[in-house]
Amino acid sequence: MFVFLVSWFASSDRKNVKYKRIVILFLLQIIISFLSLHTAGGIKILSEISAFFNWLMTQAAGGVDFVFGGLMIKSGSSVFFLSVLMPIVFISALIGILNYIKVLPFIIKWTGWILNKVTHVGELESYFAVSTAILGQPEVYLTVKEQIPKLNSKRLYTICASAMSAVSASLIASYMKMIPGKFVVVAVFLNILSALIVSCIINPYEIDENETIKIDSISEQPFFEVLGNYITDGFKLAVAVGAMLIGFVALITFLNNSFLAVIHISFTTILGYIFSPIAWLMGVSNKDIIKVGGLMATKLLTNEFVAMGDLQGMTAHLSTKANAIISSYLVSFANFGTIGIATGSIKAISQKQGTYVAKFSMKLLLGATLASILTGTIVGLYY
C-alpha cells in the first residue's frame, strides 16, 4: 500500500491512472512469486537455476585461475575481485554468443510480446522491460536507439525506470555468490513488473494497441569481434565495479568512524533509523528494521554490491523474513550512480531526450526505489 500511495502522490496525471493494467501486473507478480516460493515445483526450479549459475561460476574459475593462479592467497579465504567480479568476464562472453546467434533477441522479443498481450502496457515498454533484465545498462538503450528520439517524456520515463529497476544477466551469478540464488531469480522477474506498475501510476498514458516497433541489432560485426568486445566489456565492468566498491566502502568506513568519534553513533545506524519505517512497512520485524533500513540506505547511496557485502556480515543476525525482503530489495540498479548512466546513455543517442531524463532524474530514482520496495514486500509475504 505504501508503494501505491507514494506513487499516486507523485503521479503526473492521477485522473488517468490505468487501474486495470496495474491489477493485471500485480496479479502476475503474485502468481509468479507464489509458484516460485510456495510450490515444490517452483522451489525446485529455482534451486536448479541457482545450481546452474553456480556451475557457470565454477567454469569461469578456470580462466581466472589460469591468469591469477600464481597469487598467494591465505588458506580458507578468497579475493572478492577474483571470485565474484572476474567471472563477469565469462558470463559476458556467453551473453555475447547467445546474442550473436539470435537466441537472446528471440527470447526477448517473444517474451515481451506475450507480456504486452497480457498486460497491454505497450509493445516498446514490454520489450524494453524484458531486455533490461538480460542486457542491462547502457547496452539495452542501443536496441531501441531509433525509437528514443521519438518518445514523449512519459514513455521515456518508463523505459528508464525499467532499466534502473532491473539488473543485467552478466551480474546475476556474481549476486548469487553474495545472497541466496532464489531471491536473485525471483527479484529479476518481479522487478520487470514492479517497474511497470510504478510507472503506470507515476506517468499514466494511452497506449497505441496497433503500434509496431523496430528493434535495432546491437551488433552486425563478425563473430570473434563481437565475442572480443563482450569479453572486453565484461572486464571493464568488473574493474569499474571493483573501483566503485573500493571508493564507496572506504567512504562509508570513513563516515562511520567519523560519526562514531564525534557523536558515538555510526553513519549507517543513522541511515537505518531514517529508513526503518519503510522496512517496517515492508514486513520486517521491529528487531531487524534498523539493520535492514541501513542496508536499504547504503544501496541507494552507493550500489547493490556494497549493501550485499554488508548483508553477508549480518545474515546470521537477521530473521528469515528480513533476509528474504532485503535480499530481494537489493537486486536492482536503483541508486544515485545509475542516474548518471541513464542520463548519459540517453544523451549519447539524443541530446534533447537526455535533457528530459536529467530533469526528472530524482523522480526516476523514486520510481525505481519504489519498484524495489514492492518486489521486496511481495517476497516477504512467503516468509
Image: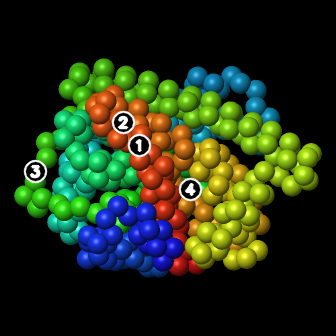
Neighbour class for label 3 at 10 Å: few (<14), some, many (≥20)?
few
Of the numbered discs 3 and 2, the one sitting upstream in the chain is 3
Left-right relation of 228 to 305: left
Q: CA distance from mark 1 to mark 3?
A: 28 Å
Callout 2 amino acid: Thr
- What residue is at 43 percent from the left and 27 percent from the top? 233
Q: CA distance from mark 2 to mark 1?
A: 6 Å
The disc at residue 212 is 3
Which residue does the numbered mark 1 point to in the structure image? Answer: 359
Which residue does the numbered mark 2 point to in the structure image? Answer: 355
Residue 209, located in which quarter of the rendered image?
bottom left
> Residue 24 placed where, x, y %?
28, 75
Up/down of 125 relative to 215, above or below: below
Residue 36, located in which quarter of the rendered image?
bottom left
| Camera-nearest residue between 96 and 367 | 367
> Residue 66 placed where, x, y %?
57, 25
Callout 3 amino acid: Thr
- What residue is at 30 percent from the left and 25 percent from the top? 226
Callout 4 amino acid: Leu
Mark 3 lies on a secondary structure that is: loop
Badge 4 vs badge 3, beta-carbon distance below 8 Å: no
- Between label 1 and label 3, give the one nearer the viewer: 1
Mark 2 lies on a secondary structure that is: helix
The disc at residue 330 is 4
Left-right relation of 269 to 38: right
Badge 1 vs badge 3, beta-carbon distance below 8 Å: no
Q: CA distance from mark 4 to mark 2?
A: 28 Å
Badge 2 vs badge 1, beta-carbon distance below 8 Å: yes
Of the numbered discs 4 and 2, the one sitting upstream in the chain is 4
Q: How is the image coloured?
A: rainbow
Q: CA distance from mark 4 to mark 1?
A: 26 Å
Callout 1 amino acid: Lys
